[in-house]
Image (spheres, rainbow, N blue to C red):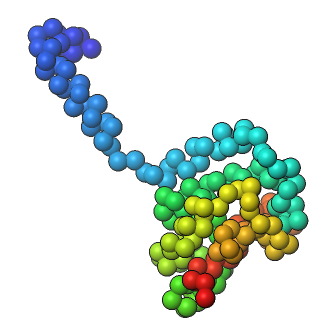
Amino acid sequence: MIIINKLYKVTPTIFFIVSVILTISVKAQPTDSCSSTKAGTVQQQNEKLQVPEKHFYNSGIDSASKFKVFFDELKNDIAKNCKAEVADKVHYPISIRVADGNVLGINNKSDFIAHYEEIINQKVKDAFAHQNFYKIRRYSEGVMIGRGVIWIGSLLNKESDPIRTEIIAINNQPLK
């Protein structure tokens, strides 16, 4: 600090230029767009739900507030192309019929990431971008995003495991 004060007394212009350059370089540091995905969850949890807590119960989802956090994170992850974060929210194995008509057998997270561009195409991105949480359709199989583009459900592997909400189907073919 003493050196900076002496430098400032000697050449205020140089000190100003150096401080501006340092400020710009700190702001210009690239940020990982996926690292802020979960940043809004506290605010989302504090947001008053406009549906009862058991609103999605018939779909196997027992907490509307927890599902809202999951939905908002997934929507954000898809919008930002956060491949690993989206892949973490998928139930494996999963078969996905992609836009060209082929069926992809996705066994794990690394398979999903390798085929991410085929799986999460513009149709899927648009479905999530336009989906209002309060207008999600509920069925006994799970909840439907868009017109059946993505299905989300709650799963339990063993009775001792916690129930997990995950993507259970992706249908990204164009409508005929």
Residue sitting nearer the eye, 109 or 56: 56
Q: Which of the 4 image quadrants contains residue 148? A: bottom right
Q: Which of the 4 image quadrants contains residue 87? A: bottom right
State the count of labels: 0
Q: Relative to 8, is 170 above or below?
A: below
Q: Relative to 122, is 72 above or below?
A: above
Residue sitting nearer the eye, 5 or 31: 31
Percent across and percent down for residue 99 are: 53, 84
Q: Residue at x 27, y 37 (%)?
A: 25
Q: Which of the 4 image quadrants contains residue 8? A: top left
Q: Relative to 135, is 19 above or below?
A: above
Percent across and percent down for residue 12 are: 15, 14
Left or right? Give the position of 79 relative to 160. left
Q: Residue at x 72, y 38 (%)?
A: 46
Percent across and percent down for residue 24 are: 27, 35
**Whether residue 105 is visible:** no
Q: Residue at x 55, y 91 (%)?
A: 101
**Whether residue 42 is visible:** yes
Residue that protrudes farthest toward the left in the picture: 10
Residue that protrudes farthest toward the bottom in the picture: 102
Residue sitting nearer the eye, 160 or 75: 75
Residue sitting nearer the eye, 9 or 108: 9
Residue that protrudes farthest toward the front in the picture: 176
Q: Relative to 45, is 128 above or below?
A: below
Left or right? Give the position of 77 relative to 66. left
Percent across and percent down for residue 54 are: 88, 54
Left or right? Give the position of 115 relative to 29. right
The quarter of the picture where the C terminus appears is bottom right
The quarter of the picture where the N terminus appears is top left
Q: Residue at x 23, y 25 (%)?
A: 19
